Structure formats: C-alpha cells, structure tokens
Image (cartoon, helix red, strand yellow):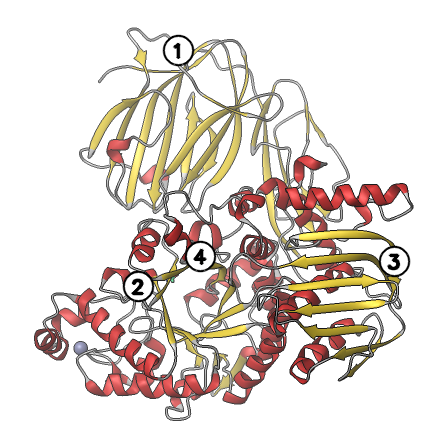
Amino acid sequence: MKRFMNEKAGAAIIAALALCACGGPSADELPVLIPQPLHVSWHAGTCQLPESLVISADDEGLVPQAAYLAEALSPYAETSVTEDASGYVRLSTDPSMAPEEYALSVKKSGISISGGSDRGVVNGIATLRQLLPAEAVSGPEIPCVRIEDKPVFGWRGVMLDVSRHFFDKEEIFMMLDQMAQLKLNKFHWHLTDDQGWRIEIKGYPDLTEKGGWRSFNKHDDICLERAAAQRNPDYLLPEKYLRTEGSSTLYGGFYTQDDIREVVAYAAARGIDVIPEIDMPGHFLQAIEHYPELTCFEPQTWTGEAFSSPLCLGKDDVLDFCEEVWKEVFELFPYEYVHIGGDEVNMKNWNRCPLCQARMKEEGLADGHALQAWFTHRMQDFFEANGKRMIGWDELLQGEVTPSTTIMWWRPWMPESVPDATALGCDVILCPQSWFYFSLEEDSGSLIRTSNYDMLPDSLSAEQKSRILGVQGNVWTERVPSWSRVEYMFYPRLLIVAEKGWCPPETVSDRTMIPRLYRYCERLDAQGINYRIPTLENFHEFCVFTDSISSTVTCPLPSAILRYTLDDSVPDTESPVYTGPITFYDDAVLTVRAFHADGRTGDWVRIAYDKCGYAEPVEVEGVKPGLHTEWYFKRFPKCDAIAGAVPDGKCVVDTVQFPDVAKGRRATGIIFKGYFNAPHDGIYTFALASNDGSLLRIDGRLVIDNDGEHTLIEKTGQAAMSAGLHPFELRYFDYNGGRVTLALVDEDGSRVPFGDGWFFHKED
Ligand code: ACM
Ligand code: ZN
C-alpha cells in the first residue's frame, strides 16, 4: 500500500491503521482527499452531522463563505447561518496563519475551521466537503480528524474558452463549485476570440449583439460529424445556444455585465479570483467583423485559419477602442490580474499597411514583434495606471517584456520561455500544452505524464523557481460543444492540477496520484460530473496467434460498464456487455468501450486479432548493424506521406531514436529502414510511443498504427516471426513533439529497450 502513497499520505494511513486496532476506520474507509493535505491526524470516533445544522461565521466578512458552506451541506442536513460562534460548524479567521492556510478540526462535539483569511476558510471547507460521504445522506458520520494545511503554489488555475463554444452562467457556476472542492483558486475566462465575443461592452453593443452569434462553422461541423460517428450526444450543439433568424440558424450567446458580476461574486465566496482574457491584438476577428475600422484592410470573416488578421496598430482609434473596452472590463473584475492574450498573431497585414508602417517608423520599431511589444506596453501602462497587472501568453517574450509582466507558458516547443522569463524577473504560470491542455484528447499516458510533470526543474535557480506562481489546466472548446464534454475533457486530469498546485512537488507522482484519483471518481459519479473513464488496460492493439486466443482487456475503474462489438462498429448503450474473456479461433476485431452507469461514454479501444503462421526470415548478404535513417524537413499530415526528392539528411542509428542531427526543426518526417533480427521463433510484442505519428511495418505487415498528429501516445502490436532477419520499416513524423521510441514488451508487460544486435541494414 505504501508504494502508492506519498510520505504524508503514508503517515495518515499509518495513523489510520493504528486506529483500526482500537476500532477506528480502516484505511479503505478513510475518505480520499485531493489535494493531499500537509498534516492529517485521524482520531478515534466519528462526528455525526445533526439533521438541523447551524453554521456560524465569527466575523461578518465570512458570511458569504458560511452561506456557501450551508449550500454545499444542504444535501446532508437542514442548514442555517448565524453570525456568532454558536454553530455546530464554526468558521473563523486566525491572523497568525498565511492567507490560504487553514486548520480543520472534526470532533464529536462539533467542527471548526479557522483560516488565515476567507481564502484559508474556503480551503478548509473544501476539505470538509471531501470528508463527507460522496452520496447525499441525512446525518452523515465523519471521521474525527485534525488537519493543518496550506498550499505550495498560489496559482491553481482553470482556463475555459467560451468563445469557440459558449457556456452559460449556470454552467460557469458548476465549474466554480467544482473548482472550490479541489482548492483551485483562479478562473481564467477566455471571453473573446475569432469565433465569438462573449462579454457585454456597453460602449460597443454590437460586440455581443452581433458578435455573440454566428452561423455554423468548421468546428461545429466537426462536432456534429463526431456526434454521429462516435455515437456520442456530448458532441451535439445544445439547443439553448441556437437561434433562428429568418431562414438561418445562428449559434451563440453572451454574458451581460450583470451575469459577469454574479459569476465574480459566486467565485469570490468560493475563494476564486476571475481573470478575464480579452485576447489582442490577434484572435480578434469577431470584433473586427462588426467594427471593421479596427483592422488594417477590408472587413474579414473567419475562414477557418488558426491565425487571423489582427488589429491595426497604426490607428490611434484602435488604441482608444482597446482602452474603452478594458475600462469596462476593469469595472467588472475586482482581481488585480487581467489577461491580454497576445498569442498567435499573424503580422502579415502590418508589413503592408501604410499606417502600421508609419507607426513602426515613428516609434523606431524593427518588425512585427516590436510593434506588438509597443502595443502591449501601451496597454500595460494603461492597466497599471488603473491598478491592474498584466498576464500574457509566452509569445510576448518575442518582443521586449517588463518584469511586471506575468507570462503564461503554453508552448513546449519554446522551452526557453520559462528560464528566459524568470531570468528577466517575470512571474510565470505553467500550462504547457503537452501536459496541461486538456482540450487535447486524453490517452493511455496522459494521467502519468501530467502527474509526473516537473514543476520546478533543477535547471532553474532558487530565485527563478520563486517566480513560478503555479499551474493551470486549460480547455479550448473548438471541439467541445456541450457541458458534459467540458467535464469529460477536464476530468480526471483536473484532479492532478489541484494536487500539483497544492502539494510539495517531490510528493506528487503518478504512483501517489493515480490510485487516489480512481477512488475520487466515486465522488464525481455521485455528483453527476462526467469524466473520462481511464484507458482500458491489458491489451495490444494488434495481436497475432496461431491456434486460438482469448481477449484480456480490463478496465481500471470497477464501476465502469464495458460494452463491445465484433463488427467494427462503435459500441453504444445497446451493445452487449463485456463480462470477461472472449476466445477467438479466427481473425477478429473486438471494439470495447466503457460507459458510466448513466450511459455517458467516451473513448473506445479496437483490438485486431490476426491468425497467422510465423513469417519466414529473408536471406540478405552483407548487412551491417543499425538502421538506415533518412529525414525530410517538412510538415507531413500522415506517415505514408513522408517522402521528398532528396532527403535533408541521413545516417545510421543503433535503434529507433530521433537522430540528434535531425533535431531542431518544428516539422520533420523520418523513415527508419533495415531488418529486425529475431533471435528465435516466437511472437514479439512491440511498444511504439511517439509525438506525433508513427507506423511500424515488419515483413511488409502493419504491426502498429500510431499515425496522425497527436501528443505522446504509445501503442502496442505483435508480429510472429521465425528466427532470422525480417524487413523492418518505421515511419515517424513530428510537428512540435520530437519523441519516438520503440521497445520490446516482455511477458510481464515491462518495456525493454533494444540493445545491440536487434537491427541491421544494408548499405545503399
Ligand atoms: C494558445 O493556445 N494559443 C494560447
Ligand atoms: Zn495597420
């Protein structure tokens, strides 16, 4: 058991085991707490919540928090709030504690939470909520306990894009309430982008009256196609966001300023600051479409490109417009930080616009990056004059930045962003795409990868480390049209963000995180929160056999219901339930998908079973060790497209690895070619992990298909071979990833790297 626990969790469990001896709860009965508190001492006995529960706030400032707790406990008891110290649950502040610190005491006689500020108190409330049973029951019992706790990082964030698809304020309330349960304390609200402007600005009403609505676009089409192909209603566009105008259907919605105030107050009661992002000077097309004078040239609509035409920075009126918008934003959001975006700016217009050119000349700006930096500094001065601090995406580092800028790092292919920014004296928030972009589909490695992310790498000095404010999980919603899908993308990965942001980095790893995360899923189930059932286990995507074979696939989450098909179709709620191994005597394709009890579902796995004999080896003379490797510096959509008149380079590698000489480009395609030397007759299992796509062929047969643009994903497949040399080809293409590894999978599932003697090639 200790193997899975960090030190503190281990200590808690040991204390619990000691309690068992005197009749206390067993370790399995103890509630799972995420994030893991710093000091936990379980005591014998339980406290039973009275059916009529009084919550008292000992100072007036804690009344909103008491009201929040009263609402959170209402499924368990009749709750009321008083402003004295007479309640069964007592909230108080203790100025000797750090603002986010708290102490929680649960005794038979009552419960007290004291915090360094209202923020500390809500953190204590979050822990209390997790001590309660997941299911709503009247008069629940809570184990007696004393918890003293505080976070390591002050920024524990969530970003939601409401531009690409819209989510109304009730959905945002749900997000905030879920964040509060995990002690996540920053809600970064991506309010504007090319596809929709979602915040009412009274000075420019068309921003929302027109810019809050649009015809169906490419993203909607993808969602609707997926809804049908994947038999998943979570990809449908909710009716409530559709509006008929004449003969056309429009999609959209926006928040009034009153909605925003309600959201901000709801968040504040739960200890959450709200950070508005008004992305500029790029990603601004929805505003430009309705206020065309904002751009350099004629009005434009979004054509489906990632980088749209930006604001014209040569026009003073544009600067005035931006300031007017921000002035209204400042009035709505009390938190000191605001987010200017600044990512992915297409600067082509600026190079040919006479006004932008004149600005560059007048200000002595050498290029587009300098022009963007000039604009950003102007805005930053305006923010600071209004008492605000500016956050921007790490593209800002391509121009000059001031140390008062906070950088949000999202581009893993720009790893120098964090050392550079912190060396310049900037604070940094971590949300690098490969680990914390939860709009990227989860895969079998995501939970491990995100759990093991190194928050404070040794390459940073102590001073640089002190500038890491924390971490954030982001969901962009191009392919996320419904709230159920939003939850599916966030969970369970958001639990890891909570733990990474709260706990000492050395105590968080996949081994401490994942078993607790699976247990926490019971709470998600009880609250009706959709989440991705962890990837099915114990299978290879491509299996070979000679006589018969039995399926081995299992689900790590016991509560999931598995359903399957044998006709290549995607299982739905009508498909038969998979109750255990199926034996195959001939070729077959088994598709298995996990479902929640309420029928909600997500990914599936497809396993091909191939009946075959051992492939005969080939006779080749004069082979040499290693694989012939050639590469092309070009972006490829698929592995089989990798080709070119002349390779950009070639070499021989001992085993499958990205040759150092081929590194450093954003896009590359590589072909490894030669022979696999099977030492004996047998079935060999390979594990191919890559970011992005890869394909493995042996003896001309496809063994592993890990193709397509994706993050680091591992797939496994088998080949039956007689001893000797077998033609081998592995193709890999990279677009911002740079990882490819091939390993042998041994009997117990371990990945064994290839040493000498496995690969040969014939010289050209
Ligand atoms: C971003 O993902 N463009 C910040
Ligand atoms: Zn211009």
Displayed-image quarter of ligand 2: bottom left
Q: Earlier in the sequence, mark 1 or mark 4?
A: 4
- Of the numbered discs in the image, which one, if any, rests on residue 618? 1
Q: Residue furthest right?
A: 23
Local SS, label 3: strand
C-alpha separation, residue under disc 1 versus residue under disc 2 = 51 Å
C-alpha separation, residue under disc 3 versus residue under disc 2 = 55 Å
Q: Residue furthest front?
A: 96
Q: Earlier in the sequence, mark 4 or mark 2?
A: 2
User: Residue at point 13% right, 80% down?
Assistant: 355
Give the residue type at disc 3.
Answer: Thr
C-alpha separation, residue under disc 4 versus residue under disc 2 = 16 Å
Mark 2 highlights which residue? Answer: 344
Mark 4–mark 2 contact, CB under 8 Å?
A: no
C-alpha separation, residue under disc 1 versus residue under disc 4 = 49 Å
Which residue is more in the foreground, 197 or 511?
A: 511
Local SS, label 1: loop
- Of the numbered discs in the image, which one, if any, rests on residue 46? 3
Give the residue type at disc 2.
Answer: Glu
Give the residue type at disc 4.
Answer: Cys
The picture places residue 590, in percent across and down from the top left corner, at: 64, 37
Give the residue type at disc 1.
Answer: Val
The picture places residue 83, in percent across and down from the top left corner, at: 75, 84
The picture places residue 324, in percent across and down from the top left corner, at: 33, 88
Q: Earlier in the sequence, mark 3 or mark 2?
A: 3
